[in-house]
Image (cartoon, grey):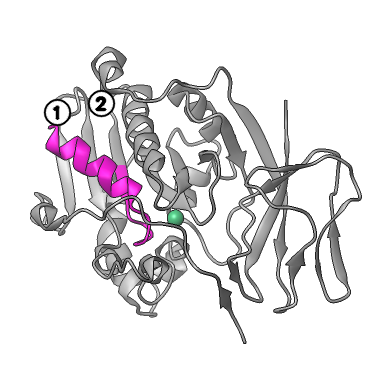
Amino acid sequence: MTERVLGHYPVDVRPIDIARYREGNTGVPYVHLLDSGTTGPTTMLQAITHGNELCGVHALDYLLREKIKPAAGKLIVAFANVDAYARFDFDDPDASRYIDEDYNRVWADEVLFGARDSAELRRARKLQPFVDMADFLLDIHSMHEPCRPIMVCGMVDKHVALARKVGVPADLLVDTGHPAGVRMRDRGSFNDPASPRSALLIECGQHWEKTAVDVAIDTMLRFLAAVDQIPFASIEPRLRIIPPPRQRVIRVTEPVVAKSMNFEFVVPLEGLGIVATAGTPIARDGETVWSAPYDDTVLVMPSTRHLKPGNTQVRFGRYED
Ligand SMILES: [Zn+2]
């Protein structure tokens, strides 16, 4: 056995038929450009980076159906891995995550402009000019396991400032990137502290839970207001969720990577659960034991459903305040 995938959660969110969005106005299928005709930022909203994550599709569908337009600058609306999404299967909903490889690990120049080929690389090469054009990016995702929403602010603190302007969700994650490859949100000058460009990735909740759709829509609308593209007063009546009284930063310090199929957790798991005491064993794999590196260690996106040697099964982090 080289991989273990346990059964899936109920699918309470339906995939939307997005065929009507195929014909955009950019020459690239499923990419739309809404131009206010006035100066302002260029912003990009993206859904289905992972084909099994449905909430972002609902958010972009809402935006386009309701004809929400930028009051300033240009807004790019992109459905990313549409070929994977087209394979969505209620009996095996995780299978549509990607076709050949993870679309969100191919964003280094040497990969994008290299010789390698895959379904995801072909799509990423089409979307790259839009990503590089954007001053602000919001990439809409969801998670394997039930968990409070998390804003992934990448590796540079400037994104935390933007997430605070957005005002949701309560938990803001500063992490260490992804060892398997560069994410879209970490590409190029998004990762440069001196550049004003800024990118956020919202994890809205479990892939197929209904509230993830509300989180996706609210975060998208608040994001457009935060980058001064739409006045807050015009999105406010559409908001569905009361914002948290405060936002806290969790700084990831280390990933926990399975070495073998013997990997197991030895504490009860909960997304953003806290292990109170430093030294408490959290997981083991043969002789290797991972213990809480400090008091109040936060378990960031622990996963037991997808076990595979080399997989990050959890990341350890701590609240900064
Ligand atoms: Zn995702």
Q: Which quarter of the rendering shows the C terminus?
A: top right
Residue 45 in percent (x, y) is at: 30, 42
Q: Secondary structure at mark 2?
A: loop
For residue 61: magenta?
yes
Instruction: Identify residue for label 2.
Output: 40
Quarter holding the N terminus is bottom right
On screen, residue 4 versus residue 254, left or right, reads left
**Tag 1 residue:** 36
- Residue 20 or 128: which is nearer the viewer? 20
Which range of residues does the magenta coloring cover?
Answer: 45-67
Task: Tell me residue 43's x, y (percent).
Answer: 30, 37
Q: Give coordinates of residue 179: x percent, y percent.
A: 61, 63
Eyeballing the image, is 71 above or below 287? above
Tag 1 near tag 2, CB within 8 Å: yes
Relative to 155, 9 lies left or right: left
Q: Which quadrant of the view contains residue 232?
A: top left
Residue at position x 65%, y 73% in the image? 310
